[in-house]
Amino acid sequence: MRVVVLGAGIVGAACARELARAGLAVTVLDRGGPAAATTAHGEGNVLVSDKGPGPELELARMSRRLWEEALAEAAGRSDADRVEWDPKGGIVVATTDAGARGLEEFAAGQRAAGVTVETLDAPGLAAAEPQVTRDFALAVHYPEDAQVQPVGAAAFLLGDALRAGAGLRTGVEVLGAVTRGGRITAVRTSAGTVEGDVFVNAAGPWSGAVAERLGAPVDVRPRRGEVLVTTPQPPTVFHKVYDADYVGAVGSGAEELQASAVVESTRAGTILLGSSRRRVGFDDRIRPEVLSVIAGKALRLFPRLAGVPVMRAYGGFRPYVPDHLPVIGPDPRLPGLWHATGHEGAGIGLSVGTGRVLADLLLGREPEIDAGPFRVDRPAVLFEGDDQ
Amino acid sequence: MSPRLVRADRDAVRRRDTPLSITVDGDALSGVAGQTIAGVLLANGRRAWRAGPSGAPRGVFCGIGVCFDCLVTVNGEPDVRACRRRAADGDQVATQSREAR
Amino acid sequence: MSRNVVIVGAGPAGLAAAAAALRAGARVTLLDAAESPGGQYHRMLPEAFAAERPGRLHHGWAAFDRARRHVLGHPRCTWLAETSVWSLERRDPGDARPPRVHLVHGPDGAGRDRSVLDPDALVLATGAHDRVLPFPGWDLPGVFTAGAAQALAKGERLAVGDEVLVAGSGPFLLPVAASLLEAGSRVRGVLEANPAATVLRGWGARPRELASQPGKAAELAGYTALLARHRVPYRTGRAVIAARGDGRVEEAVTARLRADWSVVPGTERAVPVDAVCVTHGFSPQLELPLAAGCALRDGPEDGTAFVDVDDDQRTTAPGVHAAGEITGVAGAPAARAEGLLAGWLAGGGSPDAPELRAVRRRRDQGRAFARRLAAAHPVGDGWKSWLTPRTVVCRCEETTYGALCRAADDPAGGSDRAVRLGTRAGLGPCQARICGPAVAALLGGRVTRTATPHHRPVAQPIRLGELARPPKEGTP
């Protein structure tokens, strides 16, 4: 079976890896270069803490295990080191009583679903994060949260795919579908026609546009997020620390700015400060007032960072689906077309689980989690629930 | 064999020096008003004061605020470009590395 | 209602733009990161030095001083010293106004205030800094950019060393050597990397053009005479290809170069020095033009670029003019002519004003001078052969040449962005201002180019506390 993966971001790379290792003939196409768009503009989250009980949490927990397996298998390889896997754990801090009540309830549900959740008292929080605010109502530690360097992580997955025989073609833009008997048999591209038996749409925020060009539109839209990067600092922030509003902002579908504090450091010593979510199409302007809001929220959590300089800001587009669930599976309207998209800000972490589920479905194996909730023919994806 | 200030009594621009004193990691260094912190450090024979990620020594490179090699902590504010900040009498300067400050 | 013109940068171009915009009747806000106007060319002494004869260190001081006093004293001019643009905010598509200008005021590290300007026209005159190519040991203390040596000598009367080599390429080597001599250093030599044939061919062609720049020619002749008086050898076809020492520069390794800047084997020589001052041309400061949406044009060397301007110094971004070294490196006289044009037109002056004819002619002569400069002092590709796998290319993050090559050769790596994120080259505090063009040149042809190294949406570092506070309303 010849599989053509459309998109060389981390989700496309993870799909290509699973399919190539299963012995399929895989070709990855990308309009630009590998891991150059959404993948390169995120923080590298591998989180369970921001997901309530349900299918996405199951995918997240499976993905986390698969990350560890993949890295263990590649231990000692330089490309595995460049993933910068850091199982640092997450700490969620509620600074208001209302926030604390919401967090408490949310965490209880997660605990019941099997997530490791530890409540921190004041000395516990101070020991875990010496610089964090002392003015908090509730703090919860999630030891399973991890972080990677997203471009290194994508290159690691794609490298595995290439080693297993996959091919990569960059600078190739998909223009349309060639169909025969109602089935997609090739894509027309800026570099000629590429034939295949199965086509996997893994174009992230652009997968809505790609699907439309292929004649099977899906409701995946760009949602913009911005991140501030400080100058390298001595060790200051030790976990991924975020305020309890974050879960609400992730779960919101509002067009206007949603912002909440997410603070963490990288191996290089920089501190990343997020996060914002806005629906502004593909408008890539950096908005000073958005950066100002992010800075203000981050300082509520870490007041002692007020004198630390921001040296860079970057924004990226995340693939947003109105019901906040990824889209993984075959498109019933166009046989041969599959989708692996819609992960919004969680694609780095969920990539490996997505690749595994997709490969299982494609090869007729039983996925280890229920893939039904991610199916393509659901109202949020096929515009049936569209109220915009 | 080190950088030095042109002597005021021989300076063609005929300047008048007002002395000042700063501390660098607790050591007192003397300078003159108008010098940058980098200028005071260099004129006191210090060519390097910051440690790069590997610990490699760094001092002034571009001298005009572009390269960020000369970063110091001034009165508690980190990452100040020493070549862009005029020294003020009593400034407490701390050198920086990636490990600790 | 007169127009509001904001001019970023108060060097020769920005100051001239301010004078012309005022003459056209506009209200002008002139700002600069420094305490005084002048830019790098007329870098002024600090007031605290109370210098009686500050003009002693400058060419054309009297004219500069007149322009400075006229502009700063003008009732329609607001002068914002120690002010930096940290962000330019582009308008919505279809809105023809120039971007909003986001400022921070005050010396770095002092809890600065923010403010925002909404100009009718924007003139960018942000200038350039030394371009320094990497070589083994260039990260040792005691290796300075030529601009640093000059800024310290002219701006705070400091000699960077006793025994100094000045090396690299371009006419800027000469004033730097002169500043060092004036400050009391012994200059062991001035090394121009290009062979005499290239330099002479570049400068010698079309002598009539050169005669149109009498000031520049006289200035250069003065430096040459000064070097001769101090018996400082000026050598062509020779470069500093390495610096060595234990924690600081103790010797420089020089070598004869071929025309492409590759080393002639066996010609290496160790020269004991305590400072090396290097320049390989200039890098324009392009983050603000890029943030404003201005198109760039490629420069003569791989990885270099300048702002694309039309005959009226207009960029491709609505309401945004550019002047000076960001449009091409042509020296102060050309920068002044560009500034006059940009300021006059940004201020609402008529493009048909008769006095513009002479200004345009001077600007065009300046551009011809820039072409001559580029032809006489090209950067040869052979500098890449000076590097070893252990040579640091990115000073901030200490990314080595070897690490860059390994990342570029990773088949799953692919793009320049992936290489930078993987090696951290250009991601440190200087944000690729120093290594960006060199990294781009080293990666050229090896990986997909997806981004310019000059893209810096946060144009100057801003502290979280400063960013979190809202901007102050009104004119600062």
Image (tube, coloured by chain):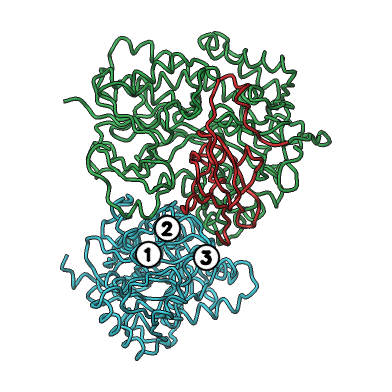
Chain colours: A cyan, B red, C green
Same subunit, tags 3 and 1: yes
Image side of residue C152 versus residue A113, left or right: right
Q: Residues within 10 Å of mark 1 (few under 14, many from 20)?
A: many
Q: Earlier in the sequence, mark 2 or mark 1?
A: 2
The CA span between labels 3 and 2 is: 29 Å
The residue lying toward the viewer, choosing from C142 and C106, is: C106
Residue found at the very far bottom of the displayed protein:
A112
Q: Which residue, given by chain and number where applicable, does mark 1 sit on?
A: A204
Answer whether labels 3 and 1 touch (C-beta < 8 Å): no
**Residue at 53% across, 19% down:** C58
Can residue A206 be seen here? The reply is no
Q: Secondary structure at mark 3?
A: loop
Q: Which residue, given by chain and number where applicable, does mark 3 sit on?
A: A235
Answer whether labels 2 and 1 touch (C-beta < 8 Å): yes
The residue lying toward the viewer, choosing from C399 and C371, is: C399
**Residue at 50% across, 62% down:** A151
Q: Which residue, given by chain and number where applicable, does mark 2 sit on?
A: A37
Q: Chain of mark 2?
A: A
Q: Residues within 10 Å of mark 2 (few under 14, many from 20)?
A: many
Can residue A346 be seen here? The reply is yes
Q: Earlier in the sequence, mark 3 or mark 1?
A: 1
